[in-house]
Image (cartoon, rainbow, N blue to C red):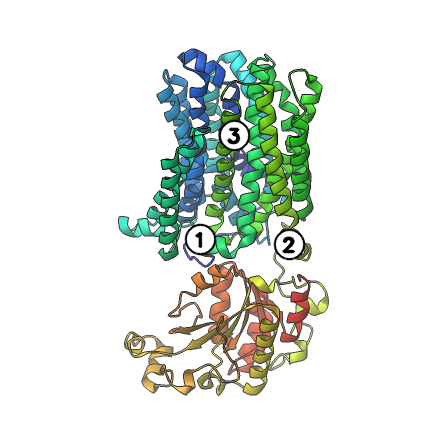
Amino acid sequence: MPSAGDTRTPERISGAGAPRGNPFGARFVAPLYLGASLNPVNSSIIATALVAIAAALRIPVGDTAILISSLYLTSALAQPAAGRLAEEFGPRRIFVAGITLVLVAGIVGSLAHSLTALIVARVLIGAGTSAGYPAAMLLIRRRAEQAGHAAPPREVLGGLSITGAATVAVGPAIGGLLIGWAGWRAAFWINIPVAAVALVLALAGVARDPDPVRFGSPRALASRIDLLGMLGFGGSLTALMIFLDALPRPDWPALAAALVLAAALVGWELRAAQPFLDVRLLVANGALTRTYLRNGLTLMGTYVILYGLTQWLEVARGLSAYQAGLMLMPMGVLTALAARVVSRRAAVRWPLIACAVLLLVGAVATLFVGTGTPIAAVICVTAVFGLTSGAGTVANQTVLYQEAPAAALGTASGLLRTFGYIGSIASAAITGTAFHRGVSDSGLHSIAWVLVAISALVLVMTVLDRQLARADRHHTNQPPAGARNPGPAPSTEPPRAELPRTESRSADMTTGTHTTPALDPARTALLLMDFQPVVLGAVPDPQGVLASAGEALAWARAHGAHVVFVRVALAEKDAAAVPAHNKTFSQAVAAGYLTDGTAATAVHESLKAEEDDLTVRKTRISAFASDTDLRAELRARGVDTLVLAGLSTSGVVLTTLRQAADEDYRLFLLADATADPDPQVHRVLMEKVFPHQAEIISTADLAALSTAVE
């Protein structure tokens, strides 16, 4: 995944006006929902067609399992890849390309007369439909930014989840009806009209990507999208899928290959400039990684029932494909209802706990299902899994949107689906192992015991995840999703040369019309910028601003926030590289007062660095223009919030704040730890400019804001 500060991000809007009317009306969301539903509906609709396909092609039913695993494997690989391509080339372009590929796949599958041709069609379907969800997530974020919203309305993201979760559950019913009416080819040709409608709606209702396509040289393009990382990820995942698909007879060479390729992938991604799979982020951002695991395990349980119970109903209970699909219809209805209810809630912890409990209840209930169980009781058991699927899908997607770096949302969304597909493939392996000697009650009960273990693990993971509670507390302090970002309230006070330290909050805060959100120190970095003797001498009251910086440093030490010291200094090679037309730095080079290695360019002695602190030397005004990859370092530490303090207000503070805001960091600016040689410029920036992009606070506010999440 690219870093949170990656300037390639296509969702950054340059000159794009806010959409007129309702930015999230049906014209915009309809193609996104339809496109995002293509993958899950193709995942589930095939379940009721396997027996008919086997009979038509005169092959064993077990051989048709590859039609499930081929789509899952392709989707697992293509989802994050499509997200990365959407970040690079624009989400609308990738969305449209994916739907076009689904059209082609529908034609290929409809005309197929062999298992090989059907596999090709399923691979094309997997590749094409994989673009829908990650591209839709990026388009929704871009739309919210264009409209000036702090976040998209909850029902918009909820609708994306509802369409995906519901189509998974109702897919067998739809598939059973279509296949009973038109034969097994309906599982393929149904993609043609649906994809055609989605394509027309997307071209008409989704605005063009504002940024032009930038290819560059093949080598540069491969580096930007981390092609080697994608291939390594695909190779390791393919080997893992081969191992799972071979169960109950383990393919140990495939497992060994998966482990070796995974180790090589990690080594490569740790060195890649723009990693496809950001290993550092996954390690540092435990909340995001746990979301992936929780989602994969939950979907594993859901798909075990979806496929295992469908086969059991058709074989052990003698139901037709249509009847088996119809029995799962209540599961789909409850999936949609649960998703809708959860999508209206800001909190996610209790829905996720309820999801895990329901998964466990459904697993235990399955232990008592047999050929003599009344059909009504079987339907009730499937309904429990419908509630689980709906609640879990929406809540996990919400956590992903909150925790993933904005610039990497496409890749992160794709990875969420990838973990889901790994769970789905594992569920196929579980079902195949349980039914390898024939579909029976004992095999169904074996599946249920595996489900009990999975659900217990999900429940423990969720209950012990304290970050979920912190996130809930944080987002209850945020403006409602869909609300516009607050601007500064008009000032009723006369102009002042400087903001006194006791009045450092923004006008919005003092009037009570805006509540400053809490910050999580574990995900926050304090940037102390240009507190150097050479700079301090140019600002009024240097001792006062230095004392405030010391107080902020003490807060960071006490609360476990990350600390970054930023200093400006030019080595000999840096000075030689400064062009004459760079007015600021050419004058500094001529005067020699920014020379690296001198006492004047060192961090002031009152601000003591410790071993875990990060010190960067910059050669231009912005803190990001340093000899250290500050973006990568912040990403590795899981930082998404910056507290800024520095000298001067019109220099490093202005440049760094604007760049950090464009890169979607949450920003807090310490007014009393910031100063400028020109008090009037300082006042205008603090009162008129910065409140649009940052929370203006004082060092005295830090303790209270951080205590709220501890």
What is the spatial separation of the Cα atoms under label 3 and label 1, in whole angstroms? 29 Å
On screen, residue 445 versus residue 646, left or right, reads: right
The amino acid type of the residue labelled 3 equals Ile
Residue type pointed to by label 2: Arg
Residue drawn where x is 44% and y is 52% of the image: 278
Q: Which residue is mark 3?
A: 430
Q: Residue at x 40, y 13 (%)?
A: 57
State how far apart marks 1 and 2 are (Cα). 22 Å
Q: Given the image, on which type of amino acid does mark 1 rest?
A: Val
Of the two numbered discs 3 and 1 in the rendering, the one whose residue sits closer to the viewer = 3
Q: Is residue 454 above or below residue 523?
A: above
Look at mark 2 in the image and give the residue it sits on: 466
- Position of 98 with respect to 649 (left or right) is left
* Proximity of marks 3 and 2: CB atoms separated by less than 8 Å: no
Q: Depth check: 704 or 559 in front?
A: 559
Q: Secondary structure at mark 1?
A: helix
Element class at badge 2: helix
Answer with the quarter of the image where residue 362 lies: top right
Q: Residue at x 43, y 61 (%)?
A: 632
Q: Which residue is mark 1?
A: 279
Local crowd at mark 2 within 10 Å, few (<14), some, or many (≥20)? few
Looking at the image, is mark 3 or mark 2 earlier in the sequence? Answer: 3
In percent of width and height, residue 656 lies at 48, 68
Q: Residue furthest toward the right?
A: 512
